[in-house]
Each structure stands twice: as C-alpha cells, then as structure tokens.
Image (cartoon, rainbow, N blue to C red):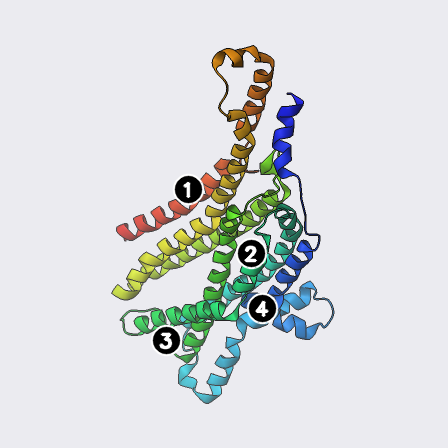
Amino acid sequence: MSGDTVEVPVRPDRAEGVVPDYAGRLAEALARGYREALIVWLARRVAVLLSRTRVNWFTASVSVLVMASWPYLVDLVLVFVAPDQAFHNTRTTLYTVAATLVCVTALGLAWGAWNHAEKLVAPLADLLADAPEREDLIRWLHRRLRARGQLLCAFAGAAVSASILVLTAVQPGDVIEPNAAVYVHTCWLGFLGGVTLYWLITVADLPLRLRKYTRLRLAWIDPARTFAIVRLCHCYALVSAAMALGVVTIEAAAIVLAYQNPGPYLYAFLLGFPVVAAAIALYVGVQPYVTLSRMVRRHLDEVIAPLMAPSDPPSEALSRHGAAEADITAYTYFAALRTLPIRTSAILQYVAGILASLIVYFVQQSVS
C-alpha cells in the first residue's frame, strides 16, 4: 500500500483545536446526575445520610432497600389508624413483596448504571474532541436532568398503575383486593417505573445524537475498535440484559394473572403490556447497536471515498497499474472491516429471544 493511500484515511481523524477541558466539563455534567437524576437521587438518599464521606456497599444496600420498601411504614400506620385499609390476605402480601423486589431492582440497577456511566466520560470526550457539535451533548444531558420531565414521567407511571388498580377493583374474580396499602405500593412502583423508563429512553437516544455529529475521532485502521464504540457496546449489553430480564418477568407475571380470569379491562392490559415492553426492549437493546454500526459504516465510507473518485479514461488508469493495485488493496481491507466490536449473531439472538417470549405468551393465551 503506497504512502499516499495510507495518508488519505489518516488525515480526517487528526485532532485540530482539541478543547482540553471538555472531558472535565462532561464529567461535571455527569456528576450532576447524582444530585438531579431522580432515580439515582432516590437510591442514594439514605446512603448519603448514613455516610458523609465515602459510600460503601453496605450503606448502598441499606439505602436501596429502605427507599424501595418505605411504603411498609404506611402499612404499619394503617394497621393502627385504619385496619380495614391494611393487608387482609396472603395474596395481597405476596403482591406487595413482588412490587418491592421490582423497586429494589430498579433503584439498584439505576445507581449501578450511573456509576458505570463514569467510564464513558474519557472515551466520549476523545470521540468528540474535534466535533463542532460537542457542546450539544453537555446541553442535552443538562436538559435531560431537568426535574420537570422526570417528574412528569414518574407521576404518569403512578397514574397508570393506579388506573389499573381502579379497573381491577370493578371486575369480579380478581386476585388482589385494592385498598390504601395496595395503592401506596402500586403507585410507588409506577412512580419508579416511569422515571426508570425516562432514563432508559435517554440512554437509548445517546447514539442517535452522536450519529448527527461530524468529525468524530474514530480509529481509522479499525473504527469499530475505537475505545468509545467498545465502551458503548459494553454499556448497551448490560442495558439489553436488564431489559430482557424485565420483559421475561413481566410476561411471566402476565401468564400467571391470566389464569385468574381478570376481566376485559385487565385482560386487555395483560395482552398489550408485554407487546409494549418488548417494543421498548428492542428500541433500548437493539437500536443503539444499529445506530453505532451505521456511524462506523459512514466513517468507513468516508475513508474509502477518495479511492472511489472518478478516474481518468481506462487507458490512463491501466498505465498506472502499480498505484491502482495499492488502491484496490486499501479498498478491500476497509470494505471487509466489521462495523461493531460484537458479532451480529449476538444481536439476532437477543431479538429472537424477545420475539420468542412474545410468541410463547400469545400461544399460551390462545390455548388457555
């Protein structure tokens, strides 16, 4: 491969006018999340009160458990103030325990995910060092940290969960008898579910924003192995696993409830909600990989573009056979590069798993 051919792909990735403090400002914006990302703030609240210095695994566990299970304090008060609004049977108790476990999972994963996001600061800062739009990423993160949007999604989740209980209350044959205690647990679960969905969508939207930026510093010799791309793929692998677990859990609960003949309203919810959950799982777990792949493919096309420029008449092209061979070698190399540091089969297996769980669920519904 000639020196000129190698020099062409290198040139677009050379840094010009890199802002040295960009990584610091990006880290500061992310650090705001511990104070302003509602789901993370809630998970850390007790731990911050218990330890003014460094939070350890014990205080973190206590914090998550306390914030997930505080509705039991309301239950305890109801036992003395309004006994008829407290728990009455084992099924209701099991329901609230399951709701609390989901809350623990949501708070714990949110806090852990935010800690993991700190590892993305340096790779993203290097990726965007030359991008004219780099400040937009910080402004976008600040906008997503605003309390108004988070609270809107959180209260919407609480309203939806309360509405489902209202519909359940007017239908015969339900396994749960709604009362004040059940409403408190359900609304808290919906509250955390709404704000968790808010941040899942935010995480999934990140590659869509990065794809709009220009002059990204991707490794020219193998863009898919750029540190930022690798880190992002690892991040979305964890998110995909959590979403897949959530979809399977929801569908398992729906199958169990379907046997209880819940009535038309709740039955419609049991049919529709797994589909919505699967669609969200695909958007959060598959769309980022597709977008990152298209980013890398676009970069490879830019690298190969100089080799594909219109040439002179064939007679002259043949006269420079030596240079043409080098161009062909370069084209063959870059055209054969992968666009993601993971195999496509892994994404297909994830999609197949989500769709298979839906198929099993609907087959079970048709048979029952």
Q: Mark 1 points at which residue?
A: 352
* Front: mark 4 or 3: 4
The residue that mark 3 highlights is 178
In the rendered image, the vertical position of residue 127 relative to residue 170, given as above or below:
above
The crowd level at tag 2 (other Cα within 10 Å; few <14, some 14-19, many 20+) is: few
- Residue at (33% x, 74% y) in the render: 166
Q: How far apart are marks 1 and 3 (CA)?
A: 37 Å
Q: In which quarter of the image is the N terminus?
A: top right
Residue receiving disc 4 = 36
Chain-order first, disc 1 or disc 2: 2
Residue 293 in the image: x percent, y percent? 51, 40
Amino acid type indicated by mark 4: Glu
Which mark lies nearer to you, 1 or 3? 1
Relative image position of residue 174 (x, y in whole percent):
32, 69
Amino acid residing under circle 1: Ala
Identity, as a three-letter code, of the amino acid under mark 2? Asp
Q: Mark 2 points at which residue?
A: 136
Q: How crowded is mark 4: few (under 14 residues within 10 Å), some or many (20 or more)?
A: some
Q: Which residue shows up at 43% across the image and 81% down it?
A: 86
- The amino acid type found where label 3 is placed reads Pro
Q: Which of marks 2 and 3 is nearer the N terminus?
A: 2
